[in-house]
Image: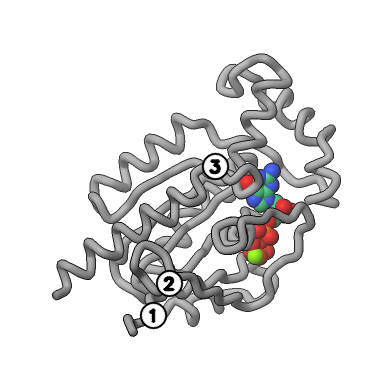
Amino acid sequence: MARKIKVVIIGDGAVGKTSLVRRFVEGKFQEDYIATIGVNVRDKKAWGLDLSLWDIYGQKSISPGKHSSHYVGAVAAMVVFDMTRKETFENLDQWINELYEVTGKIPLVIAGNKIDKIRDFEDSQDVPFSEASKEQFQEFIKDSQYHKTVYSSESEFLPVKYSEYKSWGKKKKKTLGDKISYLFTSAKTGKKVTKVFHTLSKKIKESQISFD
Ligand SMILES: Nc1nc2c(ncn2[C@@H]2O[C@H](COP(=O)(O)OP(=O)(O)OP(=O)(O)O)[C@@H](O)[C@H]2O)c(=O)[nH]1
Ligand SMILES: [Mg+2]
């Protein structure tokens, strides 16, 4: 029996970590938001690997500063942010730094999640959101069922521009090289969900070869 491979899934609260794992493991999506308390470990055999997916809570208010105790032994990570909330993108570096303090430079896949919301916006406004005003996007989110079901308070909905994400990714590649990949995903539609886990698995295999 091959040994279990620990992968951690990290990032701010409500970005879609649990949803991405659920989509990958069960092929399902749930609209309701139930914040993860502690860690939810799901096992999945894929691409010849025996993965142990550690889906870690993101809400800092639940247990501040305790995330890193769950990072020990992780060989790869998925770092998730929400394309509709810029602050979750701005926190990426903090998540990565905190992780690397415990694990060293393990392979990473970044998931810019909820890309479906950006596409919905573009379809309904008939304009690329890069050309839309901040107010236009915020009005759209506030009017959508999404805002009402997912967030009760007035959250700051400011989208992450594709170009910002790409230039951040390119910068990261300068120091991490092939250890990092960045993708756009949707746990809701399933877009790139298999791809994001497959990319991670390939990186794990490559890093294991280099350890042997
Ligand atoms: N439209 C859309 N909604 C999503 C997507 N992924 C997750 N959601 C919704 O966003 C909310 C938060 O998703 P979760 O998967 O619980 O987020 P999380 O990152 O696990 O949150 P914590 O456990 O608090 O850290 C839920 O209401 C999901 O239905 C997506 O790709 N698109
Ligand atoms: Mg969760």
Q: Is residue 13 shown to the viewer in this render?
A: no
**Element at badge 1?**
loop
Crowding at label 2, few (<14), some or many (≥20) Cα neighbours within 10 Å?
A: some
* Amino acid tagged 3: Lys
Residue with the mark numbered 2: 51
Which residue is the site of mark 3? 191
Quarter of the image with the N terminus in it: bottom left
Label ID, residue 201: none
Q: Residue at x 52, y 45 (%)?
A: 112
Q: Provide the secondary structure element on which disc 2 rests.
A: strand
Q: CA distance from mark 2 to mark 3?
A: 21 Å
Picture coordinates of residue 56, whole percent (x, y): 57, 71
Tell me residue 7's x, y (percent). 43, 70
Across the whole image, how many numbered discs are drawn on residues? 3
Residue 14 screen position, x and y as percent? 67, 57
Label 1: which residue?
4
Q: Nearer the viewer, residue 155 or 120?
A: 120
Q: Amino acid at mark 1?
A: Lys
In the displayed structure, would residue 197 be above or below residue 74?
above
Residue 49 seen in this snapshot:
yes
Q: Pointers 3 and 1 in contact (CB under 8 A)? A: no
